[in-house]
Image (cartoon, grey):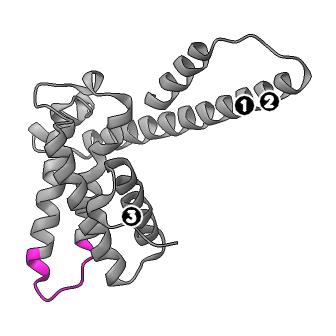
Amino acid sequence: MGERKVEDMPLSALFEQARKIHLTVTESGADQDLVKKGCEVLEKCEDMISKLGLFSSNETKDDISTNNLKYLLVPFYLAELTEKLAQEERIQILKISQAKLKEFISFCEAMELVPQEELEASVQGASNSFADRRALKIARFRRQRAAEAKLTEIKERKERRGRSTKAATLSTPVEVGEDDLLDDDGEEERE
């Protein structure tokens, strides 16, 4: 099966390819050719996102289409892959990676994706007391655990619904509106 050229691929296919490369590189490491390919694909994604005007500076997360939310990760993935490039100009590579991470964080702040306490901590220059830093870490850890639990719950609910729909289809036809299923799936995907 021949690979399509990056220039000929739609944004969704490019992003999926880049996501898989990022996952491979971060989990098990990879050769420099794969890292470079990932950077190339992500740069093309950035270019397409810009040309398509998917995000506007006056939008928040609620204004962005659910299908487009995943594209917010492009600068983050690009920063991580750029950091893994092995070149002589290591400091330059790290500066490029840092610039992409700053771009990602700024964009997350503009989209109101960063919790308020995180913003306050960064504005204060991260409070100096050990107790304050510990409290922030604990709060961040709890948010992460809650998000992971919610994700697991959503996956299980979706799996149960898939099994019950399959069982119902096999036994007797059930009249469920297609719009009802799409609304539940859309809400779960966004969440």
- Find residue 180 and report its horizontal and vertical position in percent: 59, 13
Q: Pointer 3: what residue?
A: 22
For mark 1, what is the residue? 162
Q: Residue at x 88, y 17 (%)?
A: 172
Report the number of discs: 3
Residue type at numbered disc 2:
Lys
The residue tagged with tag 1: helix, strand or loop? helix
Give the spatial CA distance, label 2 vs label 1. Answer: 6 Å
Q: Is residue 128 visible?
A: no
Q: Is residue 140 left or right of residue 166?
A: left
Sort mark 2 into few (<14), some (14-19) or many (20+) by Cα contacts within 10 Å. Answer: few
> Which numbered disc flags the more N-terminal residue, 3 or 1?
3
Picture layout, residue 96 above or below residue 127: below
Please tell me which of labels 2 and 3 falls first in the chain: 3
Contact between marks 2 and 1 (CB within 8 A): the answer is yes
Q: Secondary structure at mark 2?
A: helix
124 drawn magenta: no
**Crowdedness of circle 3 by 10 Å Cα count: few (<14), some, many (20+)?**
many
The residue to which callout 2 is attached is: 166
Front label number (2 vs 3): 2
- Report the magenta residues as a range: 83-92
**In the image as oriented, which residue stretches furthest toward the right?**
171
Q: Is residue 88 above or below residue 124?
A: below
Residue mark closest to the camera, 3 vs 1: 1
Q: The disc labelled 1 sits on which kind of residue? A: Gly
Q: CA distance from mark 2 to mark 3?
A: 34 Å
Residue at horizontal 46 percent and vertical 69 percent from the top: 24
- Between the C-alphas of marks 3 and 1, the distance is 29 Å
Residue 155: % across, % down: 62, 36
Q: Residue furthest bottom?
A: 88
At label 3, the amino acid type is: His
